[in-house]
């Protein structure tokens, strides 16, 4: 499941025996190191990992990151103040979520090169905090959902056409927002109403 030799035998000698003993000794030490490493890993480090949309319920919250080019999805407490997503709905197709939400799904291939199968999609509401600034990648960036992040409002990077955009959350309310002139409103009615007034930094 994917928020994607032979040859002649050597002559017998003591040197060969010592080499074999050395290899076996190294293999034993390596096996012990691996065993210790596995024993030291805390199972709780993986209990929040998400491997399928069926593991998430409407109202739950999650974060996304990247590891070696792949998405890493973990559940978090919805009181978490860092940027995260909240599951607003479960749908069968990508077009049912609406413009207020980003869409997330897992693809499953029954065999290499096979056509991907999508069982369901999740509609996710972006969760921001008032007074904080954020950066967002272009929508066509690889793993774009994992690249939204909080930034220092006093150190906004220079913008380039077609690149990241940067904004500040001026207001956050539990209702449809009423924003000042020049601000952009964002309202996600589910899973709990959240309205934002955003000021985008100009290039």
Image: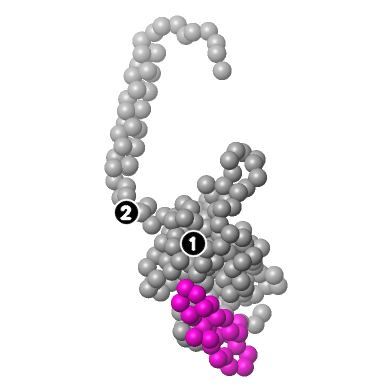
Asked if disc 1 and disc 2 are in contact, CB closer than 8 Å, the reply is: no
All told, the count of numbered labels is 2
Q: Label 2 belongs to which residue? A: 44
| Location of residue 81 (image quadrant) | bottom left
Q: Which residue is more in the foreground, 118 or 203?
A: 118
- Asked whether, in this view, residue 106 is left or right of residue 25, the answer is right
Q: Which residues are magenta?
A: 175-200
In the rendered view, would you say 105 is above or below 80? above
Query: What residue is drawn where x is 46% and y is 77%?
Result: 192
- Image coordinates of residue 74 in percent, x first then y, are 43, 59
Residue 189 colored in magenta in the image? yes
Q: Dot 1, how many residues are within 10 Å of its Cα: few (below 14), some (14-19), or many (20+)?
A: many
Quadrant position of the C terminus in the picture? bottom right
Side of 92 relative to 30 (left or right):
right
Q: Residue 179 in the image: x percent, y percent?
A: 57, 90
In the rendered structure, the answer to whether residue 20 lies left or right of residue 108 reads: left
Q: Position of residue 108 (x, y in %)?
A: 57, 47
Pick the residue in front: 129 or 31: 129
Toward the viewer: 184 or 200?
184
| Residue 133 seen in this snapshot | no
Q: Residue at x 38, y 18 (%)?
A: 19
How many angstroms separate mark 1 from mark 2 (CA)?
18 Å
Residue 92, disc: none
Residue 61 placement: quadrant: bottom left
Which residue is labeled 1 in the image? 64
Q: Earlier in the sequence, mark 1 or mark 2?
A: 2
């Amino acid at each position: 499941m994917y928020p994607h030799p032979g040859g002649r035998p050597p002559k017998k000698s003591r040197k060969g025996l010592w080499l074999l003993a050395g290899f076996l000794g190294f293999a034993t030490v390596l096996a012990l190191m691996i065993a210790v490493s596995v024993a030291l890993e805390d199972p709780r480090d993986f209990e929040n990992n998400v491997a399928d949309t069926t593991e998430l319920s409407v109202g739950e919250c999650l974060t996304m990151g990247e590891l070696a080019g792949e998405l890493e999805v973990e559940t978090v407490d919805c009181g978490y103040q860092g940027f995260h997503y909240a599951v607003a709905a479960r749908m069968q197709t990508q077009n049912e979520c609406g413009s207020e939400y980003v869409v997330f799904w897992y693809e499953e291939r029954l065999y290499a090169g096979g056509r991907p199968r999508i069982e369901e999609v999740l509609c996710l509401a972006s969760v921001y905090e008032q007074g904080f600034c954020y950066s967002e990648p272009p929508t066509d960036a690889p793993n774009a959902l994992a690249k939204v992040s909080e930034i220092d409002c006093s150190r906004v990077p220079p913008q380039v056409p077609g690149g990241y955009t940067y904004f500040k959350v001026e207001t956050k309310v539990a209702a449809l927002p009423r924003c000042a002139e020049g601000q952009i409103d964002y309202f996600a009615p589910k899973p709990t109403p959240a309205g934002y007034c955003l000021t985008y930094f100009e290039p």
